[in-house]
Amino acid sequence: MVKLTLYGLDPSPPVRAVKLTLAALNLTYEYVNVDIVARAQLSPEYLEKNPQHTVPTLEDDGHFIWDSHAIIAYLVTKYADSDALYPKDPLQRAVVDQRLHFESGVVFANGIRSISKAVLFQGQTKLPKERYDAIFEIYDFVETFLKGNDYIAGNQLTIADFSLVSSVASLEAFVSFDAAKYPRISAWIKKLEQLPYYEDANGKGVRQLVAVFKKTNFTFDI
C-alpha cells in the first residue's frame, strides 16, 4: 500500500506541479498544509524532514524528498505504468530536463521568487523595471519553446508541462497576460485546463496566489 504525504500550500507553484503529477498518476496521498506565514517551515519537526525548509516536501514510506523537479521525476519513475510523462529516450528526456531547469533557474528563481521575496517578505511596494522585464523575457522564451509543439517539451504531455504551467500561469499575479501577444502560451494553457484534475491541482491555487499579490498593491518602476 503506497503511503504518500505531501507538505505544501496551494498558492505555491512548485507544490502545484507536484499535485498535478500526483493527480496524473492517480496516486492518493495525505496533504499537510504548511503555514509559511507562521514560519511552520522553520519548526524543528519540518527542518528534520527538509533542512532547506522549502515546499513542497514529499514523504514516501519514511523517506523525504524536496524540490518539485526531483519529486515529480521520482514519482513518474517509481509509480507510472509507462515513461510517457518522463520519457526514457535520451533526447526526449534531455528536452524535458532542459525545460525543468529553465523553470527552476529562470521562471521561478528570476521571476516568481525574486518578486515574492521582495513584496511578501521584505515589504517592498515598488520594484525595479528589470523585474518587470524578466516576466516578459519568460513569456518570450515559453512562446518560442511552443513553436511547432503541442506541449512544452514536444507533442506529448510530460512533467515539464506540469512544472511550467504551475509557474507560467502564476505570472498573472505580477503582469496581466496578453493572449494576443502570446497565442501559443494561451492555447497551451487552455489545453492543460481541459485535464480533469487541472482545476483542483493548479487552477484554484493560481487564483489564490493572484489574490495575495493584488492585496499588496505593489507596482513596477516603469
Image (tube, rainbow, N blue to C red):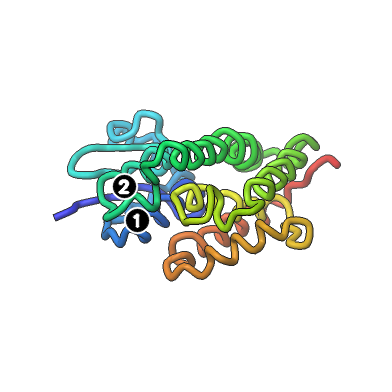
> Mark 1: which secondary structure?
helix
Q: Is residue 122 visible?
A: no
Residue occupying the point 65% across, 41% down? 119
Q: Amino acid at mark 2?
A: Leu
Q: Residues within 10 Å of mark 1 (few under 14, many from 20)?
A: many
Q: Quadrant of residue 180?
A: bottom right
Residue 220 place in picture, x, y as percent:
79, 43
* Residue 22, numbered label: 1
Q: Residues within 10 Å of mark 2 (few under 14, many from 20)?
A: some
To which residue does mark 2 refer? 75
**In the displayed structure image, the side of residue 92 where residue 126 appears, left or right:** right
* Residue 204, numbered label: none
> Mark 2: which secondary structure?
helix
**In the displayed structure image, the side of residue 144 where residue 180 appears, left or right:** right
**In the displayed structure image, the side of residue 47 where residue 35 appears, left or right:** right
In the picture shown, does residue 219 fall above or below 156? Answer: above
The C terminus sits in image quarter: top right
**Looking at this view, is 21 or 44 the one in front?**
21
Residue 46 place in picture, x, y as percent:
32, 37
The N terminus sits in image quarter: bottom left
Q: Residue furthest top?
A: 51
**Looking at this view, is 58 or 220 the one in front?**
58
Residue occupying the point 29% across, 53% down? 80
